[in-house]
């Protein structure tokens, strides 16, 4: 009996040491008492804004195929047992380059789950040689959950995107670099325009249902060259999760089908999709499943865009401003329960440590904000109202080359849901925190 007690004592002691080493309590310190908040408020008062009015605004665009092979895994819905079984529809990177003679920017989106940090790092280094600083690179992705993976490292990266595939990382980076170069070389004088279409019928709040806040708008930037060639850059907040995990074929989901529809219509030469405030938002049920479901939402959105094409007017501007704002964060809090979390070193070991920021881009009267997260559509109304008071049109996008999980309203921080607990990695109070930073950036580039 004494021997058994001794063994149990040792066992409990070992478990206690492991728990103390790996786990700690959640830190709910008020935002105003944290060093990172104080630092950020100070930096917002000293924003460095690049660019302004130039001579003439020029634009060019290009797309490049992301080539896959038999070893390509799919990123989305967690661990996949096997590589993708087939290619259902092609996936691309797309780039739009704007240049006013004083400032330039490359807007880059890819038919992937996110804009992978390992890819972005390579692109940032390569494009610096072409004169693009970090503030001049505006990344995003379509957020399809059925596209190529292999672009992340570590245990968590493997769970999200499959085994690390350095060839895939290089393939995506090379495609982006080629696309930016081609877009730059094809740039010519242009006009731009903005349109906002209420597409409420095709989106719903996936956390709390139809009675909760949604971001229902298609937001569209049109670029029209002097030779009448035109491009549309679209954002929408519905998660591209039409195709289930059981279907192991590569696809761009509804965003890829939407831009393909528009390009084939003959009304536009080019279209690109940037994921909007996709946090908390999903497509509304339309009675279909899988690819039929994706095609139906793509067709419906395309028809709305084409029906409103005559009212989307373009005008001349030469104003181009950019900011990349490095973002200080709370230490990571990957919570296992409401009050228990992994220690920061464990999180960093699993996920990798990142330096992230937020992009702000002013194009005429449009303000684009690029966030390093799944930014919740429930948070859109506040910065949107700031922009409206300034007479500006706000466009918020997700996945700007870094990734810090979900940013959702603070009042739901303790709600036991995936977005608000497991994937809210740097809370609490990130809804308010990101909101204040975005408000400051909107004011900075918008004034």
Image (cartoon, rainbow, N blue to C red):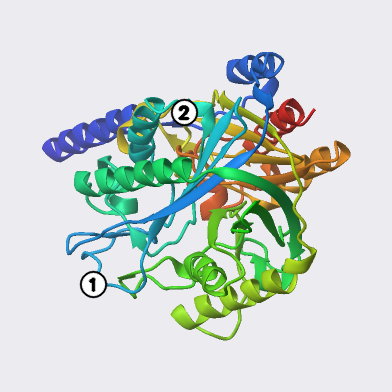
Seen from the viewer's position, the closer of residues 350 and 260 is 260
Q: CA distance from mark 2 to mark 1?
A: 38 Å
Residue bearing mark 2: 132
Among the 4 quarters of the image, the one containing residue 65: bottom left
Write down the quadrant of residue 2 in the picture.
top left
Count the marks: how many?
2
User: Which quarter shows the N terminus?
Assistant: top left
State the residue at coordinates (40%, 47%).
179
- Which x, y percent locates residue 255? 52, 65
419 or 29, nearer to the observer: 419
The image shows residue 167, relative to residue 267, as above or below, that is above
Viewer-side residue, 259 vs 140 = 259
Q: Residue 28: image x %, image y %?
A: 60, 30
Q: What quarter of the picture does the C terminus occupy?
A: top right
> What residue is rendered at 72% in x and 60% in y?
217
In the image: residue 408, left or right of residue 365: left
Task: In the rendered structure, find residue 85 and report the number of the disc placed on it.
Answer: 1
Q: Nearer the viewer, mark 2 or mark 1?
A: 2
Mark 2: secondary structure: loop
């Amino acid at each position: 009996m004494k021997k058994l007690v001794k063994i149990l004592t040792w066992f409990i002691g070992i478990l206690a040491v492991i728990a103390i080493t790996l786990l700690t309590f959640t830190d709910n310190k008020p935002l105003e008492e944290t060093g990172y908040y104080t630092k950020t408020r100070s930096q917002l008062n000293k924003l460095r804004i690049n660019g302004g009015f130039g001579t003439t605004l020029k634009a060019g665009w290009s797309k490049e195929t992301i080539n896959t092979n038999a070893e390509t895994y799919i990123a989305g819905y967690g661990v996949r047992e096997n590589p993708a079984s087939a290619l259902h529809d092609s996936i691309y990177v797309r780039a739009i380059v704007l240049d006013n003679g004083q400032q330039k920017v490359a807007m880059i989106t890819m038919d992937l789950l996110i804009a992978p940090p390992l890819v972005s790092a390579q692109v940032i280094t390569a494009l610096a040689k072409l004169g693009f600083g970090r503030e001049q690179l505006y990344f995003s992705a379509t957020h399809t959950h059925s596209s190529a993976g292999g672009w992340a490292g570590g245990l968590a990266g493997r769970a999200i995107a499959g085994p690390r595939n350095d060839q895939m990382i290089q393939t995506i980076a090379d495609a982006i670099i080629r696309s930016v170069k081609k877009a730059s070389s094809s740039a010519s004088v242009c006009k731009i325009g903005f349109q906002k279409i209420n597409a409420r019928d095709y989106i719903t709040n996936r956390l709390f249902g139809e009675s909760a806040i949604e971001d229902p708008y298609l937001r569209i930037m049109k670029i029209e060259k002097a030779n009448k060639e035109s491009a549309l850059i679209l954002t929408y907040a519905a998660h591209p999760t039409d195709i289930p995990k059981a279907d192991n074929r590569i696809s761009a989901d509804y965003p890829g089908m939407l831009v393909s529809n528009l390009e084939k219509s003959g009304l536009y030469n080019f279209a690109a999709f940037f994921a909007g405030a996709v946090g908390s938002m999903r497509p509304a049920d339309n009675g279909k499943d899988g690819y039929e479901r994706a095609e139906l939402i793509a067709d419906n959105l395309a028809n709305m865009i084409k029906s409103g094409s005559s009212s989307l007017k373009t005008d001349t501007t030469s104003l181009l401003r950019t900011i990349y704002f490095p973002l200080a964060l709370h230490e990571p809090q990957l919570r296992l329960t409401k009050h228990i979390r992994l220690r920061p070193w464990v999180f960093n070991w699993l996920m990798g440590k990142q330096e992230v920021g937020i992009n702000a881009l002013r194009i005429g009267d449009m303000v684009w904000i690029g966030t390093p997260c799944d930014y919740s559509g429930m948070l859109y109304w506040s910065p949107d109202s700031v922009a409206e008071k300034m007479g500006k049109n706000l466009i918020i996008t997700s996945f700007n080359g870094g990734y810090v999980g979900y940013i959702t309203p603070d009042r739901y921080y303790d709600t036991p849901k995936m977005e608000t607990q497991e994937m809210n990695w740097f809370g609490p109070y990130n809804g308010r925190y990101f909101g204040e930073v975005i408000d400051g950036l909107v004011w900075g580039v918008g004034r």
